[in-house]
Image: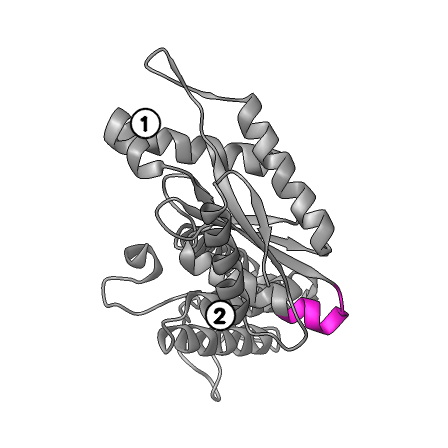
Amino acid sequence: MAAQAKNDNNVVHLAIPPASTGRKVGGKSPGQSKSAAPAAEYFQRIELYARKIRQTKNIDSIIETLEEALRETRALHTSTEMAAARQQVAHAEERIERLKSELELVTHLVREDQLTRALNRRGLEEALKREVARAARTSSPLCIAMIDIDNFKKLNDTHGHQAGDKVLVHIVDIIQDTLRTNDLIGRYGGEEFLVLLPGSPLEAACDVMQRLQSQLAQKPIVWENQELRVTFSVGVAALRPAETEPTLIGRTDKAMYEAKRKGKNCVVVAA
């Protein structure tokens, strides 16, 4: 990735201006006309974007800068004064598009749990922060649920870690098939998952969790010709006015442990 974003001299180049030809006459090359001015200005602005990229290590900021450069480049397609530099502009657009796509892929991967393809802890924290801000801005409800697989250590000890991995993937598949498209799931810990339910009131969120438990009971995991019956305990909490993300997660986590104490395979609403 880094090698594609930089050349051999470790300098980011988004576009390479065409080399001038001929000697200058009166401060201009013989073939230079007024149409060359927009081209020169364009390459100067693109170099400013490249310099901005070199000065940041934040992938999201780099992608935003690339989007600005793309808008600048695409605008030139409608400029009749840019005919002489059209090929260079098209080449620059292709390079910027490719780099932006590669960075977006990297950004997605660093937020994804490699085993289950759910969000990882980092992705979850970013998503929760975003949803809490949206709920506050729109005065809409937000519920989250902490899911913990029951007796997971015993399952690993009995059937091995490969069986445990299959259980994790199976549960995420069931949850993703059941949730709405705007709901999110991420792996919070080893066998813990956090589900974000934007727009859902507390009662509806509890119904969703009970439906997930029912779906899991109906779809056991087959491992080495054995059916593995797996259950999970859930804590559910609704966002309170002005509540922070750590406090919300803390209440949800306590409710999940209360579900464990009550006998597991149940849903408990956070206090």
Please tell me which residue is depicted at 52% across the width and 56% down the height of the picture.
Answer: 255
Which of the two discs, 1 and 2, labels the residue nearer the N terminus? 1
Please tell me which residue is depicted at 53% across the width and 64% down the height of the picture.
Answer: 251
Quarter of the image with the N terminus in it: bottom left
Tell which of 202 and 13 is nearer to you.
Answer: 202
Outermost residue to the top: 225
Q: Secondary structure at mark 2?
A: helix
Please tell me which residue is depicted at 57% across the width and 78% down the height of the picture.
Answer: 37
Tell which of 259 and 69 is nearer to you.
Answer: 259
Q: Please identify the quarter of the rendering in which residue 7 is found.
A: bottom left
Q: Please identify the quarter of the rendering in which residue 165 is found.
A: top left
Res. 65 mark: none
Q: Position of residue 257 (x, y in %)?
A: 45, 53
Q: Position of residue 270 (x, y in %)?
A: 58, 59
Quarter of the image with the C terminus in it: bottom right
**Type of amino acid at the residue the image marks with label 2:** Pro
Q: Position of residue 14 (x, y in %)?
A: 43, 65
- Look at the image and say whether residue 149 sits in the magenta stretch: no
The range drawn in magenta is 133-140
Q: Which residue is mark 1?
A: 163
Tell which of 93 and 227 is nearer to you.
Answer: 227
Q: Which residue is mark 2?
A: 246
